[in-house]
Image (tube, rainbow, N blue to C red):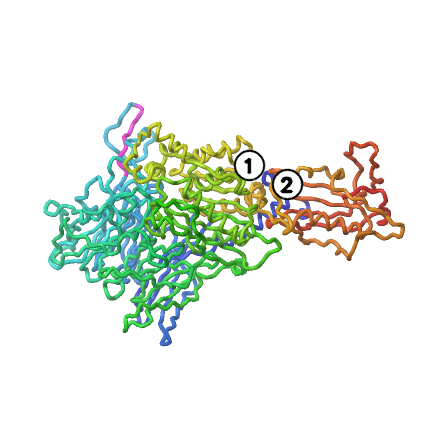
Amino acid sequence: MDGSKAGPLKELPLGIDATTEEEYASQSRLLQEFTSISSIDKAWIFKSDSGIGSQAMFSISQPNLLANKRKKFILSSHISRESNNSVNFQWAPFPVEMTGVSVIVPSPSGAKLLVVRNPENESPCQFEIWGRAQVEKEFHIPQSVHGSVYADGWFQGISWNSDETLISYVAEEPSPSKPTFTGQGYKKGSSTEKDFGNWKGQGDWKEEWGKPMLEKGSLHFLSSTLTEAQAVKGIEKSLSVGQVVWAPPVRGSHQYLVFVGWSEGTRKLGIKYCFNRPCALYVVRAPNFESEADGPELKDNSTEDFPVVNLTQSISSAFYPRFSPDGKFLSFLSARSSVESGAHSATDSLHRIDWPIDGLLSSSAKIVDVVPVVMCAEDGSFPGLYWSSFLSNPWLSDGCTMIITSFWGSCQVILSVNVLSGEVLRISPTDSNSSWSVLTLDGDNIVAVSSSPVDVPHINYGYLVDKESKSTGWSWLNVPSPTNECSDKVKSLLSSLQFSIMKIPLRDVSDSVTKGAAKPIEAIFVSSKTKRNDPFDPLIVILHGGPHAVSLSSFSKSLAFLSSIGFNLLLVNYRGSLGFGEEALQSLLGKVGSQDVNDVLVAIDHVIDLGLASPSKLAVLGGSHGGFLTTHLIGQAPDKFVAAAALNPVCNLALMAPDKFAAAATRNPACNLALMVGRTDIPDWCYVEAYGSEGKNTFTEAPSAEHLTLFHRKSPISHSSKVKTPTLFLLGDVRLPVFTGLQYARALKEKGVPVKVNVFPNDAHAIERPQSDFESFLNIGPSSDFCHRFAGFLTPFLRSTPSSMVLGMEEYSNISASLEIIDEDEVVELESDGIKIENNGDDEITDVKEKIQEPKVGMVFDNIYELIQYYREYGKQSGFPVIKRSSTKGDDGELRYITLACARSGTCKSNSSNTLKPHPSIKNNCKAQIRAGLSLSGSWQVNSIKLDHNHDLRDIIGCQHL
């Protein structure tokens, strides 16, 4: 077979030519290099067999784009402390993949390991108890007993008892039986066997805690000596349970379990990211085992003589119970500020209960406030607790100091909290703007991970400088690790970037606002270390969701990708963000769409005033409430951004500040509260953010016309008529139903605004499945068809412009209007901007002051003007006139490619309407030309050249040219 024979032509994606496709492919390869960077999720420390040093086990994950899942690995290391206060990690040569594993939980001593594999389809749930070299016991629990074990980090509760003979856990309740019908009607009895002669009905609908949460958790336990799982009895059906832990054992007494319970009430509202759902700590008697001749036997777990007790009746929220090492007290976190105000997240508090040593429990136990809610922090002081992760064993050896990860302004930090005195200390480096998170404790030492917007996550080891003097100073060692690895290309790109955290004073602050709400806001600014040809790189404003969340100074693979391809980033923490005290947070309730919008505009003007950004090169990107803000901004400031991307946006609330943006991207945006309130799993969010805290009491499942009117007035959809900004919508959610984003996108399209919509129907609110996330940021960043319009979507609207001239959108459009797609055998000569070249009779070309370099592939020009002027001057020097041979626009009407050629190419065709105007000299199909294309950075690059002419280069008199 002739191997040189051409195969069938490949069909390119719609609107993409071959050159653009190659650029798109190149950027996708770069994004994949960023995507493949591993994440360090968890870690555990075990005593070493030799008694010297310790063993560490790290849980690592990495996106698998082909499978659209995350691969999970275990990487092991031996840790040894050296005499000179250094630490040595000896890493295993390779990680081990945990295929099909949902969660792993080591026993307290580290001698055993529980591995849980949740079922797929109708298969049973698998439990494996591993020893040091083998599986010691395996359980297969059918779905008639329970469904998947919760492994979500919120409802999740898997706990070993102290002697490692029992394991308690929370799993999904079994699905209720459904009615069976045949051709004759209802069939009595229930059968799980498949029979083609009958069919299952739907049965009663069951409410869920919102997507992607499960319906309801029930408490179960396993015994290392029994062969089946048992449900814990006595818990009310109205309670959903989670976060179970074993209470300290009391000799000669029953064992008890402490768990978090959420009461269903009249409806289960969405609970993911929503900490304003009331919850309490409960205690229940654990199953009792008695020794029999044939082995241990489970006795009846009757609760008649000990009903389930609510330990925290006096507080509206209690979760993450942790017993002190000596068992004398129980500590827990509370989100009562969220519950009482209605804000979905707010400043947390820490509390404790003294645990009775005799095991006699009471619902009247005194709750001690350890760390109260901080309303307004002084500059540089502790801003309050904002938990982001909580270790199962957070205690130092003194038995009263907890190590906690929390937010501190725009940083994530590690805190030590003395549960007896209430003293809170920041122990991660105070001179670092990076973000830190505790992974595990190695005795009184800390294994942590740190990162920044320009540094991939890396492992650190912290120790007290002087334990004897009880110094509060901690020293941190950087640990070389395989987890720090990334490609050389990514390393090089990241090394060229820098970031800073800005404090930005507010403007026109009302005298009526609280002190905390009047303080400066913060924003993270990411930029290149080196100055490029253009004085300003394009700026993308990044807006977090929530609104009560925070943009942290930690590593984001997607944002690092955008930074690496030439964009500066501004991550704005507007008032209402976590990490800045409760007064600033609560100030946003009832003012969404105005206060938060103003804060973002103030931040943008701040970087412009500092000379760090150009007002003509702004784009905005946000998801959820950040998408709500994105769609607000492009309506309130329709000329400020060149492009926008909205990710699941909330698009129906209100807008106000024209002439600001040129582009936007939004991910699951909240565009229309009036539509959202009837379909979302968090309708109360609409009321609280629109009405303020009073919305908590105003909330109803049957909104009035007055409610809907306010929701519409507060929503971005009410300002859609003013939007000019090209916008990318990334949608796929139950919390923010897709149709609300589609409504807003259609409204923009109706008035001629460039719009692109990507829908990810099988993803969740964050659109975080590997393939969805990858495609989202590939569309935002590089040059797809839509990207050409936005900059990926944003790129073309954030192009570099010459330092002597900021090219406005209107001016650029006028230039583009004169450039058309031209057939290959035609030459259209420009009527405008033509120049006359005269021959002085001495075969010398005038007005050429210095030698012009011969064209070469790869030459770069800041803009199209410089490109044309260069080839024009080169033509003068060489003795031939220049003409535009052809040009190509993108679907947005903007110029993408141009061919400049000798004026004697092709056939002559003049579009002059002046019959007295001389026509060009006779053409002779000269092939000399250069072809250039617009790059992602906004510059023009020469892609191909032909230098040879088929005529005398001095015979140019009478030629009409550029």
> Is 209 rendered above or below residue 565?
above
Q: Residues within 10 Å of mark 2 (few under 14, many from 20)?
A: few
Q: Residue furthest bottom?
A: 83
Q: In the displayed structure, does residue 165 sit left or right of residue 930?
A: left
What residue did someone put label 2 on?
Answer: 811
> Is 585 rendered above or below residue 38?
above
Residue under the image location 37 percent in, 50 percent down: 100
What residue did someone put label 1 on?
Answer: 754
Q: Quadrant of the C terminus?
A: top right
Comparing labels 2 and 1, the label whose residue is closer to the camera? 2
Q: Nearer the viewer, residue 299 or 925?
A: 925
Amino acid of disc 2: Glu
Q: Which residues are magenta?
A: 175-183
Q: Secondary structure at mark 1?
A: loop
Q: Residue furthest top?
A: 184
Q: Nearer the viewer, residue 601 or 121?
A: 601
Q: Residue furthest right?
A: 841
Q: Position of residue 87 (x, y in %)?
A: 38, 71
Q: Position of residue 935 (x, y in %)?
A: 62, 49
Q: Position of residue 649 (x, y in %)?
A: 44, 39
Q: Residues within 10 Å of mark 1 (few under 14, many from 20)?
A: many
Gap between marks 2 and 1, in whole Å?
18 Å
Q: Secondary structure at mark 2?
A: helix
Residue under the image location 53 percent in, 33 percent down: 749
Judge whether residue 328 can be spotted in this image.
Answer: yes
Q: In the displayed structure, does residue 904 sit left or right of residue 90?
A: right
Q: In the displayed structure, does residue 730 sit left or right of residue 302?
A: right
Q: Is residue 177 magenta?
A: yes
Amino acid of disc 1: Pro
Q: Nearer the viewer, residue 369 or 659?
A: 659
N-term mark: 2 or 1: 1
Q: Residue furthest left?
A: 305
